[in-house]
Image (tube, rainbow, N blue to C red):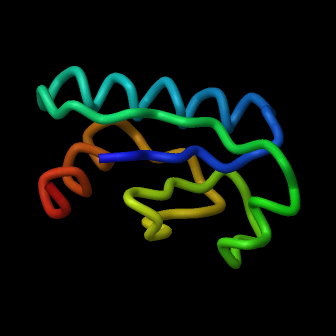
Amino acid sequence: MIIKILGSGCKNCVALKENTEAALKSTGIDAEVIKVEAMKDIVSYGVMQTPALVIDEKVMSYGKVLKPKDIEAILQKVK
């Protein structure tokens, strides 16, 4: 599983990355977490608000910082 955090590196983007890593640790799911900061790459996903959470090239959330428990629920659905 490849998880991408789309965002410019703002505090919300950092928080989403940290919450994603916490959710992965708590669920025991093995995934690679990648930060995508280039605006042209972010726009290619059709995302106009960051931060965004992309799992295996599918946009799962954008424009908000999900809590670890919310990310865990998403991970359980897609694994």
> Relative to 34, is 78 on the left or the right?
left
Q: Residue at x 38, y 59 (%)?
A: 56
Q: Residue at x 43, y 30 (%)?
A: 19
| Coordinates of residue 74 in the picture (x, y in percent) | 25, 57
The vertical placement of 37 against 14, above or below, is below
| Coordinates of residue 79 in the picture (x, y in percent) | 14, 55
Question: Outermost residue, right direction?
Answer: 39
Q: Quadrant of residue 10?
A: top right
| Coordinates of residue 76 in the picture (x, y in percent) | 13, 53
Q: Quadrant of residue 24?
A: top left
> Relative to 16, is 72 on the left or the right?
left
Q: Residue at x 49, y 63 (%)?
A: 61
> Relative to 77, is 15 on the left or the right?
right
The vertical placement of 30 against 47, above or below, is above
| Coordinates of residue 33 in the picture (x, y in percent) | 46, 34
The vertical placement of 38 against 29, above or below, is below
Question: How many tags in the picture?
Answer: 0
> Relative to 28, is 48 on the left or the right?
right
The vertical placement of 64 against 2, above or below, is below
Q: In this rendered view, identify the residue nearer to me: 3 or 13.
A: 3
Q: Residue at x 66, y 50 (%)?
A: 6
